[in-house]
Image (tube, rainbow, N blue to C red):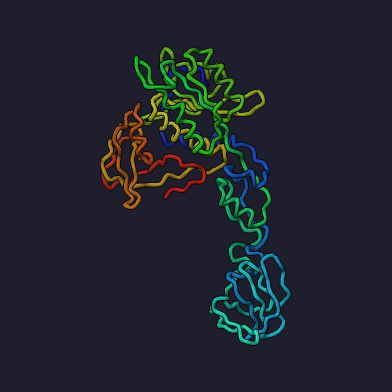
Amino acid sequence: MQSASATDPLVAPPPAGWTEARSRVYAVGLAGALPATLRPLAEVDGHTLAEPLTTRTDLPAFPTSSVDGWAVRGEGPWRVVGRVLAGSAPPPLSDDGSTVEIATGAMVPAGATAIVRVEESTRTPEGLVTGTPRPNPEWRLPGEEAGAGEELVPAGTPVDPALVGLAASCGQDSLRVRRPPRAALLVFGDELLTAGPPGAGRVRDALGPSVPAWLRRYGCQVRAADVVGPVADTLPAHVAALRTALGTADLVCTTGGTMNGPVDHLHPALAALGADYVVNTVAVRPGFPMLLARVTSDDGRVRFVAGLPGNPQSAVVALVSLVAPLLAGLQGRPLPVLPHTTLAEPVPGRGRYTHLALARLDRVAGTAYPVRHVGSAMLRGLATADGFVVIAPDTSGEPGDRVPFVPLPLLPGERAT
């Protein structure tokens, strides 16, 4: 790691390659993964499994009827000897020609040879049941879904309502999980307005309202009180804001100040805090002056600072490039594997830099189209895009090329359609 005290651009190391930067920050996040704790099922939604989910019993644990009807033994007609409802353990059917009325989900009695659906049965004047069982058994067998002790879901899986329900169904009362990371945002720039239209040399802050929403989509907890700014363009103000935010957050994102201009105080502030760079600039366009640093507190706990460029689209490129893999590591999740898509139109390269180009997907055709209005300071194109196509250094994208695609994050638990 490079110390944050080395801020002279004349001796700064070359920028990290985009793929290398993703791998590097993921490895650092995984090394500092949040501690695992045992939590009751009611409290684990939005967390991440710290160990595989296994079932305590066979699923189903006993043979269960899949229909309402009659559990019969032998050939009909059948004499009714009882009723079985869900939640009870019935006695066995001991005699041929006997039957019990059975409800969906009820335990099938031992000795039953078939189940006749209620809508396919009749009662004789003598009270006997007649009907023809279907060829395939109308019950679920023990272990049909899973065997006792079987791994159902691997560690590193985000916990959503479906997983909570599965855990309950297989007998778990609690899960060992990693909590969502806590994140904060510091907005730098005296030129920013927080309300009303831009004008007179001042621009509206677009990142203060939007970055927390992106972070939540990556599984972070961000409170309104954790969003601070604009922070005054002075070194003491930057150091104080960072120190306060790092007191409670696992990750502090900052906007602006990632270069070395006269009012760019992020690098000196990181040096004052004893930070080490994990990545200091990335060979990607847009978003080149992004960074990730780590700060180790007196108690040995590691926290991270992600420096996002001040231009809005560049900031989002930094989020998908550095913050997303870091957060995956902190939560003990796998590094997301990028899907591929086919270019429908040409996308220019950016020389020796990786080009992340905003695109929308035609999911029916499996193709990607570049969008318009994609300047570093623009958000119009981002608002209509599904993510970024990745054009490797020293190449350009031509129609028909298969290229990696970086999707914009969904809400926790959402699945892309």
User: Which residue is more in the foreground, 392 or 355?
Assistant: 355
Q: Residue at x 45, y 24 (%)?
A: 255
Q: Residue at x 46, y 17 (%)?
A: 7
- Quadrant in the picture for residue 337: top left
278 to 66, vertically: above or below: above
Provide residue 76's location: percent of width, then percent of height.
62, 86
Q: Is residue 186 left or right of residue 287?
A: right
User: Which residue is more in the foreground, 107 or 129?
Assistant: 129
Q: Residue at x 57, y 73 (%)?
A: 138
- Residue 279 seen: yes
- Residue 75 seen: no
Provide residue 208's location: percent of width, then percent of height.
46, 26
**Residue at the outermost right position:** 91
**Residue at the outermost front position:** 125
Q: Is residue 415 left or right of residue 401?
A: right
- Quadrant in the picture for residue 220: top right
Provide residue 32's location: percent of width, then percent of height.
59, 34
Q: Residue at x 66, y 72 (%)?
A: 108
User: Which residue is more in the foreground, 112 or 5?
Assistant: 112
